[in-house]
Structures are given as C-alpha cells and as structure tokens.
Image (spheres, helix red, strand yellow):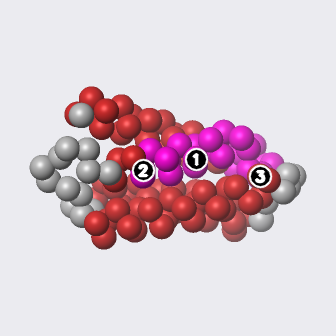
Amino acid sequence: MEAVRLILRYAHLVGFALLLGGALVQYYTGRIYINAVMLWGATIQVVTGIALAAPLGREVQPDPVKLAVKGVIAIMIFIMVLIPYLKKRETVNKGHFLAIIGLTLVNAAVAVFWR
C-alpha cells in the first residue's frame, strides 16, 4: 500500500506542476486564458487528492479538517478552470486568473505547513 500512496503523491505533484506551470506560462506570455494543461493539472489534483485522502492502510490518518480545507480549495480551482475552458473563452479576467494561481499556491501551502 505504501507504493500506491507514493505513486499517488507523485501524480498529485505532477498535477500541481501542470496547473501552476500552465498558468504561469499564460500569464507571462500576456495572453491570459485557460489552456488544456491547466485543466489536466486541476483534474489530476482533484482525483489524486481524493485517492490520497482514502485510508490506505495507514495507522495514522491525516487531519480531517486539513483534508476538507484542501478539498474545498481544489474543487474551487477545478471549477474556476473548467467553466472558462468549456465556454472556450479566448481571454479570462486577470483577477480570475490570478485567483487560480493564488489558490493553487495556498493549497500547496496548506499541504506543506499544516501539521
């Protein structure tokens, strides 16, 4: 079970990298829109996050409040990425886009600093 958990954690980090990397590339090119890489990253984050929250035979379970906070943030990010992508918007409001980047960084901070 430890190998499954480590693979899920690795995939979770890849999803984070796709989401944040895709967003930063769009931001620095000047054309702010939601690309497919960001959608894949957000999707991977939610799916692997749910799988990581499952009790995979661990003796010590993660804090349920932390999991709930991370879950809410991840779902908010997913919705903020999905809706403009499905509507095929050519540009996204800068505040909306910066909120996606900010929430992604907050989600990572919760994972790292909340014990």
> Which quadrant of the rendered structure holds the N terminus?
top left
Q: Position of residue 25 (x, y in %)?
A: 67, 41
Q: Which residues are magenta?
A: 25-50
- Residue at image location 44% in from the left, 35% down from the top: 11
Cα–Cα span, label 2 and label 1:
10 Å
Residue at image mark 3: 85
Residue 34 higher or lower than 95, as above or below: above
Q: Residue at x 35, y 47 (%)?
A: 52
Q: Are marks 1 and 3 in contact (CB under 8 Å)?
A: no
Percent position of residue 68, x then y = 38, 67
User: Would you say residue 91 sits in the magenta stretch?
Assistant: no
Quadrant of the drawing holding the C terminus: bottom left
Give the class, few, some or many, for how many residues have Cα within 10 Å of label 1's Cα (few <14, many ≥20): many
Tell me, for residue 12, which label it has, or none. none
Tag of residue 43: 1
Left or right of 14? Residue 27 is right
Would residue 50 be found to the left or right of residue 76 on screen?
left
* Quadrant housing residue 67: bottom left
The reply to whether residue 91 is in sight is no
Q: Dot 3: within a 10 Å radius of its alpha carbon, few (fewer than 14), some, or many (20 or more) residues?
A: some
Classify mark 2: residues with Cα within 10 Å, few (<14), some (14-19) or many (20+). many
Indicate left or right for 95 with 4 as reference. right
Query: Does the stretch in magenta take in 42?
Result: yes
**Quarter-of-image position of residue 40:** top right
- Residue 92 falls in image quadrant: bottom right
Give the residue type that dot 2 points to: Gly
**Residue at left 30%, top 37%?**
5
Which residue bears the numbered disc 2? 49
- Give the residue displayed 79% in from the left and 53% down from the top: 86
| Residue 64 is at least partly visible in this image | yes
